[in-house]
Structure formats: structure tokens, C-alpha cells
Image: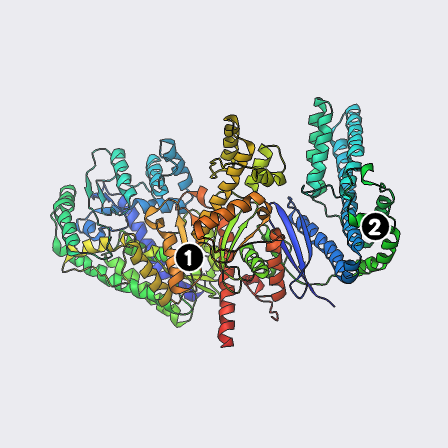
Amino acid sequence: MNKYYLGVDLGSTTSKAVIINENDEIIGRGITNTRSNYSVAADIAKDEAIYNARFSVLEKKLENEINARPEFKKYINDLESVFQYEQFKVRLDRLGDELVATCNNFFKDETKRNEILNHLRSIRRSFKPKIKHDYLYNNLGAKNQFFRDIVSEKYNEEVNKLDMELFEPLMTVWDKSISPAENQRVQFNFQELVQKAMEELREKYKNLPDTISDNNSVNFDAEMNLLKGNFDQVAETLRQHIEEIAKIEFNIANMTGTGYGRALLPFPSDCIRSEILCHAFGAHAIFPETRTVLDIGGQDTKAIQVDKYGLVTSFQMNDRCAAGCGRYLGYIADEMSISLNELGPMAMKAEKDVNICSTCTVFAGAELRELTNLGEKREDILGGLHKAIIMRAMSLIARSGGVFNEFTFTGGVARNPAVIKYLTQLVKENYGDNIKLNIHTDSIFMGALGGAMFARRNIQADLPAGKKETKTV
Amino acid sequence: MADPKEAIKEKSMVIQKDMLAKQFNELSRAKEIGKKVVYTFVPGNLTELILAFDMLPVYPEINALQSGMRKKSGGYIKDAEKIGYSEDVCTYVKCDIGMMLNGNIGPTGEKLPSPDLLLLSYTGCFTFLKWFENLERLYPGVPVAMLHTPYQEDGNITKDQVDYMVKQLKEEVIPKFEQVSGKKFDEARLGKMLENSVTAEEYWVKILELAKNKPSPIDAYFAGVYYMGPINTAFRGTDECVEYYQELYKEVCERVKNKQLPVNPEGEMKEERFRLVVEGPPNWTNFREFWKIFYDMGAVIVASTYTKVGGLYDTGFRHNPKEPLESLSRYCMGCYTNLNLPQRVDLIEKYVKEYQADGFLINSIKSCNSFSAGQLMIMRQIEQRTGVPVGFIESDLVDPRYFSYANIKNRLESYFQMLEQRKIILNQEVNQL
């Protein structure tokens, strides 16, 4: 039987899970927002990684067929997306139950209660099809695909359309319901859900317009055209394989928990490891020549030096203040009323870097308003903010000993193009042209990957409590 | 605690406890018994000289750290800030000022007497100067004696520097002592006390060096701060001080013989997993929690620089009864924070090598520039010269607002896991050869 290894990285903002096989290849990734119940966040990330692993096993299994028939790949990708929607639907139902329960508890007056309940029903009716459409046609785009983010955005949109006097009661009901809904772990039957997804997908393909001009919101492409007309045949060919992968037992031979919330994970203590070691190990595994790692996460910036084995020789972390980390960007995005993912692209349009102080997140917000008043362009202010983040990171890097070749950048913030731009620029200015900068598309998963790799190797870096169990290396 | 071995260990602790009780009791009755009180600092303290004039020393930093350990510093600091001390001022100063504002109740609950003399015997820390200027204002009319201690900028103590300090002792310090105490300077008496100092110093060095044993019988930082008490403060030069170190030496030798590991508040350590050298003072407000992170992980501090803050003896310096004033001068200039950075690096390198440490850790203190300036350079140098993994954490002396347990624990856990991995890899490399 194949053996798999799991790494869970419970960060301050997102929880990530990675499953690897015996060759250290990533076969499953799962990510969700960290919430008050850490264990649920970890479980959801892990469940998602396992679902994702099933799909990637499927793709791997059909590698040859997929190469010959691009529509297979399209079908599998669409299926995964619809599969996510099926999960989303169940969560939405749970949230609906919570909303009704909150309403019943909260409003003693029957008329008021019924009024609010009616509004909740109509809100739900109006946003559900939109969300379905976004999932089915991959329109979620760069937005955060976490349940909470998607639903709250739509809910807010609908509430804002209503009378102002409804705002407060509807938001109160929301605030009281979202956390309990989010802190439940919903367990899905993969087989059942994937069946439903296939049916849903069939409906989608059946209703596809004939030409692009019929509906511009549909992303037409070559694969889609290949699918049109013979989707039933594709589905039937794949059905048997899909049923097979649904039955695979993912035997997790060992696991490691890491990240800021690691101590709260329901893992044995010898399966808990510092995220500094995990990030370094993950980054080194992907880029084996790595000697310096910079990780910018939600609340930590870490500058790490590693040796030829990927083991940490020294590290520096931000102390006392998390300005310049992911949350700093989140705060700025809120201040500017734009989504986190739009920040980087907007900052890329900067024509100059406005000087902004990075010592305090809250002050940066004030500075931003002041600079806006002074007539600075948003893009330029954002350019300055992104530069400020990197300036702060550069100081930590200097404290840890500097940049050595190769230099790998990891963490959620590594997806931001403006951060990469300024990092490249400042590394060049400070450490010369000969530094190779590595950034991987999986940069946010590096900690979880490192954890999974530690789990596979079983290198003991345990706490005393875990030492009693002897394991074979 | 019923363990007979524990009982033997306790003898030195009992001696120290009695010494401290007697000291604070005497201080509370100073006026009554007609003894004059000198406020002074631990680095470069002239304890023997003070005692030779029958005066009683009070060390404000010790009071501050005691307030920190007794969870009183937070309130004292707030009171000092209320009257205008900035957030950035050294928290020892603010804690001390706050304590005085609150009636100057010392660590034993007895009131501390007001100073009859302020003796600034160490100027390596600029804050000390300002601190005493403020005390002067709190105690109007109190005489101040200042002894300027030249920094070892070139890494050695020159004859000129010694002459300069002796001159100050003769012309500034001793006349003020005579004036305040009403007694004549008795060089023979000072010499006699310095003989005791030398004996205690010999024992102290031997005790510290027993940590070279594997496993180490003592923790030279967390327990070291207790061991260093008598010799770094009010007792150096006394018979009790000699007795204390004699006893402690006996106890530690016994521990070595029995292959016993260091004792912590929860008992004896079970296993020595990591040997560390630590630079910088500890945090006092969360001292126990801080210590626990180390002993829970099996980390023993085999050498520390902080325990040398009141005198550095393990590189050979001893007080000299034959040249009392010269040796007091050399002592002042030789205390740890008066060394220049290359000297500090050399000393730490020596510790890492001689005590066979697995790692070097810095606890960088927000309040203390004397310690913290240059620490990153020290860290890099030690890493390059010794190859041991280095770690860096930040906290404060007595301001509880600057101790973040979660952050410190997170960094230390990572650091210990790093050390563990390194050990495994090094073993594998050795086995492959």
C-alpha cells in the first residue's frame, strides 16, 4: 500500500495541509482560514488536502490519456471546482440553520423575528445562484476562496441593498452565526459528493451556449469546445476511474504539525515542530541550493539561514510588533476598501514609491489617509507600502546574517507581485546581482511541506515528552 | 525536599538566606545602630571599601530586580512614568524610582534607609550617571562621590588608567567616605577584607569551572544568579562570604561526584540535552517561567556572561591586598560590561569551547544598552568562530509589559529543535566517516 505523509501548518491567518508520497512529491494541498477552533481549521485543511490528493491521483493515473485528450483535463478540473461547490452548499445549509437559530433566540418579538427571517431567506435566494455560477464557471478568480470570505462578501452586498434600519439586526444575526457555523467540521462522503458534482457538471455542459456571443461571462476555450458535444462520453470514460480514486484509502503513515497554533493541534507532542524549521526544510526541498529563506506570513517575518541539509543554522524573527507582515497588508486593504489580492497588482502600477513608515500597522493606516489627502495616487502609496514591508524584512535578513545564494522566498505574502518586485530590487541593491531568487507557486505551503517531509524522514527533533517513543528512521 | 542530598544542597542556601536577612535587618535599623548608608551599583562596586568604613551598601539594581521577581515592578514603573519618566528609560531606574516613591520598602518588606552618600563607582553605563542625578533630586543635599571608570577601549588596562582611578579614589572617594562615616581610612583593614575577597574569588572560579563537567552539576545562569549574589554585592570581603563559597564549592563537588544534574524549582534535572552559553541578563518579572522553558527542554547553561557583571575572575584577576587601591581600580575596569566588544567575543568564544557548549544564546534586553549594543556582531562572530548554532531572543529586565511568553517560547522551541537536528546530523556525519 502506498504510504502518505501529512504536514499541517496552522498559521495565524491560514491553515495549510500538504500530503506527500514516499518520493516527497506533493499530491494534495488544502488551505482554509484559521478560526477560533484550531482543530477544526486543521481538520478542514487536512480534508481538503485529501480531496485534492484524490484528484491529483486521478490526473496522474490518466496522465497518458490526458496528454492525448485535453478535454479530460478540463473535465477533471471542472469537476474539482464543482466538487468544492458541493461542499460549499452543505456549509451554506449549516450556516442557514445557524442563522435561523440565532434569529429565533435573539428576537423575542414575533413580528420582528419573522421579518428578519424573511429577509434572510430572500438574501440567501439571491446570492446562492451567483455563488454557484462563480464556482461552476471559475469566476471566483483571485479572490480568497474560503467559505467565510465568499459568503460574507455576498451577504454584505445583499444587506447593503436593504433599508438602513435592517443593517444592524441583520449584521448582528450574521456575527452571532458565522463563528459557530465555521467552527463545525462537516465531514463529507467523497463518493456521494463527487457523484453529485458529476451530475451538476452534466447540467452545466448541457446548458452551455453554442457560441461565445451568447454569454460573455463563460470562459470559452479550446478544451471547452472539445467537451461540448461529447461531455457524456468523457464523463462515462472517466466515471470508473473516479469511482476508483474515491475508494482509495489514504494511509497517513506519519504527520507533523507546525505553525503558530501548533501546540493546540491534537497531535502527539513528538509530531509538533517549529515552523522555522519546517519552512526552511520545505524551501530547501524545492530549491536544494537554498541557503537563505525569507518567510513572510500573517504575523511573522522570519529570516532563516540553512545549511546544505536544509537545517537551520540561525534565524531572526520580528519581535513585539507584526507590522510588515501579511496582516499589515490585510489592514491596508481594509482601509482602502479593496481586496487583499488586488493590492499587489495595484502597487505594480506605482510610478514612484511614496515614503511610508513601516513601524506600526495602525499608523500606516493614518499615514495612508494623510497621503491621500495630500493628493498622492493610490498606486504610488501602495508602492511605498510594499517597499516598506520589504525594508523591514531586509533589516531582519541583515540581522540573521545577510543573503546567501540561493535565496528562497516563502509564505502567503510571496504571492504578491509588488512584494516580489521590491524584494528583487532591494536584494540586488544590498547583496549584488549574483543572488538567485526562488519563488515557488506553492510558497504558501512550504511550512506544511517541510512538516510532511519531516514526518516522512522522522528526524527526531522532539520535545522531551515525545522522546520515549522510539521510531525507526 | 526530604531527600538527604537536597538537605546538603540547602546548607549554602540557608547561609545566603541568613546573610540577606541580616543585611536588610541591619539596613532597616541603620539610623538606630548609627551606620551610614551608601547607595551604589553592582558593576565595579567598592564593597570592601564601604565595609571598611563600617558603612552599609544598598544596590538599587538589586532592589529593582527583586521587585521584578516579586511582581511589584510593573506598578513601580507605572508610578515613575506618571511623574514623567519616558517609556524608553531603563526599567531598573523606573522601578527603583517607583519603589522610592512608594516608601522605599525593600525586598524583605522592611523599609530601606535613605542614602547618606551616593557612590557612583561605575560610569560604563551612562544611565547610571542619570540615575544618580535623579536620586540626588529625590534626596536633596545628599553628597555624591563619582568615580570615573575608563572603558577598556583598546582591550587592556593601562597603568595610566589605574593611576587615574587611584587618584580619584584618594582625592574624591576616600575623603567623602571619611567625611560621611566620620572615620579615618584604615588601609590595613581594607587589605584584610581583600584577603577574604581573594579566597572567595578562588572558590567562585572553581565553582563556575565545575560546569565544564558533563553533565554539568549546576546551571550557571538561572541558578548562577543566586550563586553570584554574595560576591557581587554587599558581602565580598566578609568572612560569611568566604564561608558561603566554601560551602557551595563543597556541595557542587559532591554533585559532580554523584553525577547529579542541576537543581531547578521543580527538582533535579533528569537529562542534560543541550549545553548553552548565554549572554545578557535574564528577565526578572517572569524568571521562573523563563527558566522552566530551558529545564523542560533539558537545556543547561554552562557559562554566562551576566554572572560576571559584578566582577570577572575566571580570566585571572584577583583583588590584591598588597595594592588595595590599585586592585580596586583594576577590578572596576575589569567587570564584564566594561570590556570592549572584541574582548567580549574572545571571552564568549573561550566559554563555548572550554565548556563544550552546543549553542550560544543571547537574551537581548530592551533596557540595557551596556549589554545590548553590539550583541548582533557578537552573535555573528561566535557563529563564525565556533560553528555552534546561535539564538537571539528579546525581553526586558523588570518591565512585565516586554515579556511575551508565547514569542519567547516559540523562538526557544525552534532553537532547541535546531540544536537537536544539528546533533543528529553531526552524529550521522561522524558515523559515515
Which residue is at the front of the view, B129 or A443?
A: A443
Q: Quadrant of residue A126?
A: top right
Asked whether, in this view, residue A417 is left or right of residue B45, the answer is right
The amino acid type of the residue labelled 1 equals Leu
Residue at 19% in and 58% down:
B194
Asked which secondary structure carries label 2, the reply is helix
Q: Quadrant of residue B88?
A: top left
The amino acid type of the residue labelled 2 equals Leu
When the figure is inspected, residue A120 is found, relative to residue B58, above or below; the finding is above
When the figure is inspected, residue B261 is found, relative to residue B406, above or below; the finding is below
Q: Position of residue A216 (x, y in %)?
A: 78, 37
Residue B280 seen in render: no
Q: Position of residue B168 (x, y in %)?
A: 15, 47
Point out which mark residue B361 bears: 1
Residue that label 2 marks:
A227
Which residue is at the front of the view, B268 or A377?
A: A377
Residue B309 seen in render: yes
The alpha-carbon separation of the residues under discs 1 and 2 comes to: 62 Å
Point out which mark residue B251 bears: none
Asked which secondary structure carries label 1, the reply is strand
Q: Determine if marks 1 and 2 fall on one subunit.
A: no
Residue sitting at the far bottom: B433
Other residues around mark 1 within 10 Å, as few (<14) / some (14–19) / many (≥20): many
* Nearer mark to the viewer, of 1 and 2: 2
